[in-house]
Amino acid sequence: MRFTLSWLGEHLDAAESLERLSESLIALGLEVEAIIDRAAALAPFVVARVIEARAHPNADRLKVCVVDAGGAPLQVVCGAPNARAGMKAVFAPPGTVIPGTGLQLTRSTMRGIESNGMLLSERELGLGEDHAGIIDLDAAAVVGTPAAGALGLDDPVIDVAVTPNRPDCLGVRGIARDLAAAGQGTLKPRAMAAIPGRFQSPIGVRLAFSAETAAACPLFCGRYIRGVRNGPSPRWLQDRLKAIGLRPISALVDITNFVTMDLGRPLHVFDADTLAGGIHVRLSRTGERIAALNGRTYVLDDQVTVIADDDGVLGLGGVIGGEGSGCRESTVNVFVESALFDPLRTAASGRRLGIESDARYRFERGVDPESAWPGIEVATEMILALCGGEPSEAVSAGAVPAWRRSIRFRPARVQHLGGLDIPEDETLGILASLGFAVAGAGAELAVTPPSWRSDIHGEADLVEEVVRVHGYDRVPAVPLSRTARVTRPAVAPRQRRTAMVRRALAARGLCEAVTWSFLAARQAALFGGGDPALHLSNPISADLDTMRPSPLPNLIAAAARNLARGHDRVALFEIGAGYADTTPDGQSLIAAGIRCGAAAPRHWAAAERAPDVYDAKADLVEALQAAGASVEGLQHDTATPTWYHGGQAGAVKLGPKTVLGHFGVVHPRVLEALDVAAPLVAFELYLDRLPAPRARGSRMRPPLATSDLPAVERDFAFVVEQAVSADAVVRAARGADRALIVDVAVFDVYVGAAVGAGRKSLAVAVRLRPTERTLTEAEIEAVSRKIIAAVGKTTGGTLRT
Amino acid sequence: MTDADSLQTEVAALERELMRAIGAAGETATLEQVRVAALGRKGRITELMHGLPALAPAERKRAGAAFNAVRDRIAAAIAARQRALHEAEVEARLRAEALDVTLPPRPTDRGTIHPVSQVTEEIIAIFADMGFTVAEGPDIEDDFHNFTALNIPPEHPARQMHDTFYLEAAPGAAPMVLRTHTSPVQIRAMRAGPPPYRVIAPGRTFRRDSDQTHTPMFHQVEGLVIDRSTHMGNLKGCLEEFGRAFFEVENLRMRFRPSHFPFTEPSAEVDIGCRRKGNELVIGAGEDWLEILGCGMVHPRVLEHVGLDPETHQGFAFGMGIDRVAMLKYGIPDLRAFFESDLRWLRHYGFAALDVPGLAMGLAR
């Protein structure tokens, strides 16, 4: 919402500085987006009179002018065809920067004639596109004064953002009322006498709605004015409209735009001679068309409020007028409309048809129901004043809808809810100055909001009005009471666990990324997602149209982008949601990570290698450990989802059913689909599947069990079939004597001729820890035999000889 | 000259000769030869000692003492020489083992924590100290939690397709939405148990917006305090404490401006003071203002939607952009880069793994 300082002054007696005014607006909740002081930008330019303009001796299209800019006469070379002696123009002295070109003006010689400045066109002054000639100022402009004044640009423009609950501030008067309530001046009274009609309106109005749709237009007021002279509106009106970014069109149209901005009261003026029969307001019929004032033609459904005559649709109620019935220069007789339209229907129609207009903007937020009649009178008064003519009696259909409502108000709530301790009479004074009627006395009052405050419904709204006008900055800040003397944990154990995983992965060299929660459906499908129920019906782009099954695909895509940027080593992770369905339970927390390119930075002491499945496994195991999972008890499995390499990936499970995570080389088909040229390893950890950490309970560690008896380590090399997993051998060995064997570690894997084709040798170190006495050689022998037997039994492995 | 005298002379000569040999021994092996030649079973001193019984008893005693003294001196000299040679040999070996220590050590890969995670933890640390706990809610929400319960009527512009992501609806069902704010967690928190409530809810939020300063996904943190007496003064107090702690500016200027949200009444937007110096932004100083959050007293209709009586319960809520305050605090220029996973950006703006924010050790280094 834009207005100028002098425009505000029409409604508000105030002598505040612009700065103070701006602060007050902000404090009232009318956020000042910009203050455009056009005069400041035009300060170097002054009004000059052209004393003489003669032809340039050396150039046909140039003139040599002598100008009076308030000092000694100056010679200026000018190329404008309209430069002539006696005119008043805008003069730029040497040294100024020309807004339209951005160039600094210098004293120069043009075709042998010295030029000491420049006479400017609209375009050169940055005011418009007109460059046909220099600006021809009004003859009354005073030589040597700032050009901004003569151009009508010395009135600062204030642009405020009005929140949707305050349609009353979509008119200058509403803003003035708020400022006055806050003590920034006095609202000027506004006398509004009904203008007597001189004859009966030849055009009648009728509301043609069913009982169910009657709310579409509760009231339609109109007046016929005959014998008007349309033409350009006066300078003051044009200046105001231009200042706020509206293009002056003709007096009749400018009047409607002015009243819309001045009072927040949209109007429409029909050329009465184009109307066929009376006006009726009704819902549109499917297929009806209208050529609107914006030059476009719209085909309507059956839900739009239309103003119609016997021939068809004249305009879309509350949205836009029609081209055919609009005012022209030649218009003589007019019919003025001031009506009420339903906010919801107006919004829906405007949205469906894609029409933005100042009228729609106001009607969809709610126009003051009591403003329809005054609107007619204001419009009539201005039309008579600017265009002449003779008014008919006003006509109307419908009635002002009921808007009065009483709200219980306890002034003590200002303190209890608003935290503001002010005297009750001040509270009531604020409400009165905003137009609220207060009845009753004591602790509970009855407050009726004014007709223009459709946003006020309850006590909390009234508290806001009082605190807002008094000033949010005057509410004392009171710290919250402490709930505990020493800070208690804010996060649940599960949330803490997530934080630990995040930091553990970063400590392992992976960089945390945050990627979109959505991706392309075809990519989701590669990772077991892409369920149509998880498609967005209005995605931002086709590449982001489906909720992701896991953070992994987006990480892989990120790796591809980083590789393309020249990174030779990419290690990323993300902890975020995967979505299996649209229910809250369908969302799960997944830690995913990838490594590709080199496993480590190139280094003189280490051979280069690419990350392999064991790097991914290490990441997963580390993450599990950080999450507090007991890694010892976990099971391994080679069954993995389709997006992993069938032979170089694995699953980590808690028991036979619960898969905690996957790791491995990502399937080349998937990498190809995601444009990743290099091999890539990944892991996914399903954090929600981990057993819930104990919320409370003992922090006590089990006692440390140590033994002074020497541990014994024995190495075994088993030859097994290739298909036998190391895990199976280790488990078998480990199970051979649960009491004595404390650790079994694989320290060598050998494949080659020495063990025969299709077989491998696994060397394990078995650590025995005696508990009661030092083991004898015979006892160690006995355990060894048990180990060999157990491995042989479960894996078919034999001792390598 | 007695036998003893000549023997003495011979011993003295031998001592000189041996001392010379010990001194001349350049390595332990040579020294060992000297030792064997002198003190070994057939060594020369040993052999001289064998000649003692031939002397007269008186002389024997005197010469014996002298010989012993010589033998001890020789032994001591050999031991000393042995230590010196060993030292020298170690020194020589170490010299031979010298390496170029200017070579780089084996690298340790350091990953980073994303600014969103880091700043979220900072925010949690501060609100934890004010008695808040962390609540969560799903990203995919139903209409009730995201809109209706928050007093956002069906015709509200926020519900229109251009602001909200909708999921494709099952036949006959209302479409689910991607939550447009973290406010639905207010509703979930209040429906999960009885008041009082003091919770924050950080998380992902989604709006159908994509330009210089907007991304279709971003992060918010919601705050909610409900009890019987919390008022707007407490809202200001709480957020002012937060602002000072988070931006680590003790006299941070904050401004509460009236605004409008369907789910709060009264409503406010909060600005922090700042100064722009070219491209640099100094928080807390200067005359400019930067909006950081929206807040207000929870609307009575929101309380009614979760079964609370606005006559007995009241409090405030706020919603703040995590990415936005991260940008302001750490001078990160472009929101879109947060989600591009560019390693250069992640390493530059990310945080060390062990840099865990906390109030006791300081929020940020």
Image: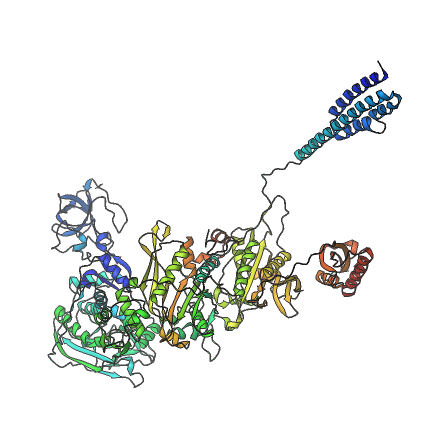
Please count the marks in the image: 0
Residue A540 seen: no
Q: Residue furthest top?
A: B1
Q: Residue furthest bottom?
A: A211
Quadrant the N terminus of chain B occupies: top right
Query: At which x and y percent is residue A15?
Result: 17, 59
Q: How is the image coloured?
A: rainbow
Query: Vertically, is A203 above or below B160?
Result: below
Query: Vertically, is A184 above or below A111?
Result: below
Q: Residue furthest right?
A: B54
Q: Is residue B111 left or right of residue A27?
A: right
Res. A504 image quadrant:
bottom right
Q: Nearer the viewer, residue A645 or B365?
A: B365
Query: Vertically, is A416 above or below A511?
Result: below
Res. B37 image quadrant:
top right
Res. A720 image quadrant:
bottom right
- Residue found 18% across the figure and 81% down from its top: A395
Query: At which x and y percent is residue A38?
Result: 23, 55
Q: Nearer the viewer, residue B357 or B104?
A: B357
Q: Nearer the viewer, residue A798 or B45?
A: B45
Query: At which x and y percent is residue A391?
Result: 13, 76
Query: Vertically, is A670 above or below A228?
Result: above
Query: At which x and y percent is residue A603?
Result: 60, 45
Residue B311 seen: yes
